[in-house]
Image: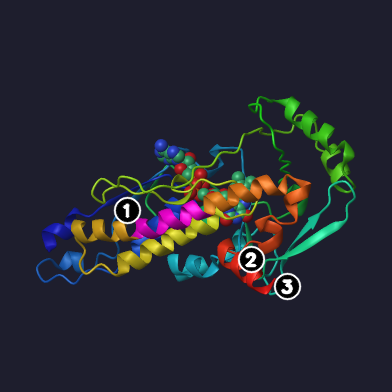
Amino acid sequence: MTQLDAKIRVMVIGGGCAGLLIAQVLKKVRPVRCQTDLRLMVQAGIPCTVFEQASSIDARPRDWNFAIYWAQSPLEQCLPEDINNLLLTAQVDNHVPNAKDAIPVFHGETGEKIKEIPAPYSLRLGKKKFTRLISRGLDIQGILDSYDKPDIAHWDWMLIPTWIQEEPATLSGSAIIEDMKRRAQSFADPYKTIIQAIPDGTKAWHNRLSYWPTQPWDNLDGRVTLAGDAAHPMTFHRGQGLNNAIHDAATLLQQLLAMPEKTPEALAAAVLEYEKEVWQRGKAAVESSAQNTLMVHDWAKMADSPLLKFGTVQKVEIQQNKAEAVS
Ligand SMILES: Cc1cc2nc3c(=O)[nH]c(=O)nc-3n(C[C@H](O)[C@H](O)[C@H](O)COP(=O)(O)OP(=O)(O)OC[C@H]3O[C@@H](n4cnc5c(N)ncnc54)[C@H](O)[C@@H]3O)c2cc1C
């Protein structure tokens, strides 16, 4: 067993949330008791190095925030206690999550509140802050930085207008903000004023959203696998990508902890079991998010969209069945 134990080493490509959580999870796999080599007895976890293409968390100017709606418990399982204790510090503000948390949805032209979507105990995290926090204690080639803006006057705000467009996304430079301001002419206040107040020259991006309904992939005998957006890239309007990435890491943790021995064969079997769950859940999440994105851009269908009808829960089909049973 000593010889085989020494052969396990994991390389994570991409230091995003999924990659970092997987690296944290690998640290949790307990050392295998070994009679012949005392050094291995104190080696906790499966050795892992994360390779990130960006030279630092701030190397890319773009940041955003995302919410954890239903993956709080899996997240806690993936992280060590010291990082769990600091999770609230990765939020975008000082909000204390509570049972009454909700997402207000407003009509852009009238300003009328359409709905409050319940989001109890959700965590709204800054991507860079969260990435920095969960990279603690890991062997990462590339990421190093410091980023903190405690004064609200210096905060960055995330404004994301989205619309359906058949043509390719071609706007660049100042034309993006100009286009946002033109589109916001018909908005109610305060949205109109907020968008008109964006300083000219503010860096902005114009992207076409894409998604890929997950299918099983060739894992090269358990030596390569996928997690997070690499496994299930989805549109963001119902906020499911990170929640699913966390679920991936927690699923892998369960499989790793169930390994009867720390060998390449056992690891390959664990990876295979992990994938069975991930690709099916990923496919459902990608398709439901795509359907939701189309519906929230169509007034006739918006009220029936998964976001407005079921909120940010994980499994829409379960909620759908409940709703049909009641009606
Ligand atoms: C505006 C917006 C709002 C969102 N809101 C929510 C929300 O509220 N709730 C939610 O659950 N999800 C939300 N999401 C989705 C969420 O952000 C993603 O699902 C999540 O960040 C995916 O993490 P990841 O680690 O899989 O991918 P990424 O964060 O994209 O990380 C991948 C990493 O891999 C690196 N990389 C890529 N290729 C290579 C390479 N060849 N070599 C080395 N490194 C490489 C990249 O530099 C990157 O750092 C939102 C997304 C957006 C855009």
Relative to residue 36, is residue 287 drawn left or right?
right
Task: Give the residue pinned by disc 2.
Answer: 122
Label 3 close to label 1 by CB (< 8 Å): no
The disc labelled 3 sits on which kind of residue?
Lys
Mark whose residue sits in front, 2 or 1: 2
Occupied quadrant, residue 172: top right
> Furthest residue to the left?
36
Helix, strand or loop for disc 2: loop
Image quarter (top left, top right, bottom left or bottom right) of the N terminus: bottom left
Helix, strand or loop for disc 1: strand
The residue sitting at 66% across, 63% down in the picture is: 310
State the CA–CA distance, disc 3 to disc 1: 40 Å
**What colouring style does the render use?**
rainbow
Q: Is residue 321 magenta?
A: no
Which stretch appears magenta? 274-284
Is residue 143 visible to us here?
no
Task: Give the residue pinned by disc 1.
Answer: 48
State the CA–CA distance, disc 2 to disc 1: 30 Å
Label 2 close to label 1 by CB (< 8 Å): no
Q: Which mark is residue 100?
A: 3
Q: x and y percent of residue 194 in the render?
A: 84, 44
The disc labelled 2 sits on which kind of residue?
Ser
State the CA–CA distance, disc 3 to disc 2: 10 Å
